[in-house]
Amino acid sequence: MTAVLVLCEQSGLADIRAWVSYMGAAWCGEVADAEKALDRVHAYGFATVSSAKLIRRAFSIAIKFDRTVYDSLYVALATEYGIQLVTADEKLVKAVESRCPVRWLGSL
């Protein structure tokens, strides 16, 4: 499974598509391999945000739009920073687009 999250550079946050994809692939291996991958990702200087900061908002979004908390964390992150989430998850976009800053990747 690959998640795609594009964050506007205007917000000071980097595009983390590669980070999410890379960490998902790395985690399928040994823990030591995942730790090395995480070190390489951090070397790129990508911004990270703790999910603890977003979990209440994500839970509210999940309940309101009948989505998973996992998916809702991405929406909560975009909402928190006032930026647009660009995702390949068309079902997520259709569920929340009327009230949340999301856009389907296929429309670009």
Image (cartoon, rainbow, N blue to C red):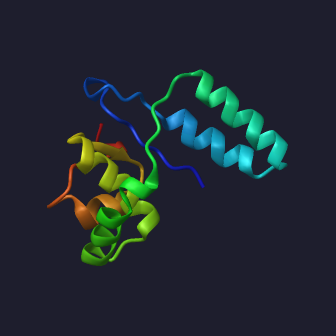
Residue 53's x, y, as percent?
37, 54
Q: Where residue 103 appears, x then y in whole percent? A: 27, 47
Quadrant (top left/top right/bottom left/bottom right) for the N terminus: bottom right
Residue at the spot 20% in from the left edge and 56% down from the top edge: 100
Q: Is residue 27 above or below residue 60?
A: above
Q: 106 or 20, which is in the foreground?
A: 20
Image coords of residue 8 (percent x, y): 30, 30
Q: Is residue 45 left or right of residue 25?
A: left
Give the total of numbered labels.
Answer: 0
Between residues 99 and 49, which one lies in front from this camera angle? 49
Residue occupying the point 25% across, 24% down: 10
Please say whether residue 103 is visible from this viewpoint.
no
16 relative position to 29: left or right: left
Q: Quadrant of residue 9?
A: top left
Query: Furthest residue to the front?
Result: 53
Relative image position of residue 67 (x, y in whole percent): 37, 72
Q: Residue at x 43, y 57 (%)?
A: 52
Answer with the quarter of the image where residue 75 lies. bottom left
Q: Quadrant of residue 54?
A: bottom left
Q: Nearer the viewer, residue 66 or 11?
A: 11
* Residue name at image x 27 percent, y 67 percent: 95
Where, quadrant-wise, is the C terminus in this rendering? top left
Q: Decide if residue 97 is on the left or right side of residue 16.
A: left
Residue 30 in view here: yes
